[in-house]
Amino acid sequence: MYAFQTSRFHSQEPNWLDCQKFPRSALPAKDARWLLDTGSLTAHLRRVSQGHFHVEVLFQRWQIPRLSERRLLGMGDRDWGLIREVRLHCHNQPWVYARSVLPATSLVGRLDRLRTLDNRPLGHLLFTDPHMSRDRYEICRVPAAALGEPVTEQDDDGLWGRRSRFVLSGHPIMVSEIFLPAFRSW
């Protein structure tokens, strides 16, 4: 069973903006390609890493999600969710930090299997589900130090991230992804 405690990563909420309201010219071309791609990030990372891909689970616990996450998912102030934070590694380097919020009310029926992902990528399960739909992205910039990542001068301006709400058989979940310094150097 998972313990009830707060996350040690990314404690302040980023300022998420609807991708259609975010000026595309503000996005570096290389980052924009990944940030706005509607396909499976997991599949893309597996492809570009030539199969040298793995998931490192940092945190998976029941807790009350952040305010903006609850709003995005239509959750009440006292509703619990399974919070999962992982790093997606390519060539043994962390390329993406991902935070998923799975409301307790969404983990029913066939979606109950999402409670026990362990080190399996959530993205693979989402994109192979024939009943999945996805809302458009929200985009943000996050200080690299907020994720506990080593900071270089290049990272001082922050790391790009995106999040979206997925709906599986009428049940919402949220996935946010922050592209880490090792990703930028690829």
Image: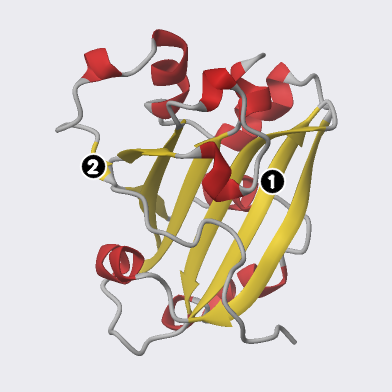
Q: Secondary structure at mark 1?
A: strand
Is residue 151 shown to the viewer in this render?
yes
Q: Quadrant of the N terminus?
A: bottom right
Work out whether 178 lies above or below 91.
below
The image shows residue 165 at horizontal and vertical percentages of 36, 54
| Left or right relative to 172: residue 113 | right
Q: Which residue is mark 2?
A: 17
The image shows residue 138 at horizontal and vertical percentages of 30, 42
| Left or right relative to 64: residue 48 | right
Q: Which mark is residue 87?
A: 1
Q: CA distance from mark 2 to mark 1?
A: 23 Å
Disc on the earlier residue, 2 or 1: 2
Seen at 56% across and 43% down, the residue is: 145
Work out whether 34 lies above or below 149.
above
Using the rendered view, name the quadrant where residue 168 is placed.
Answer: bottom left
The image shows residue 125 at horizontal and vertical percentages of 61, 52
Amino acid tagged 2: Leu
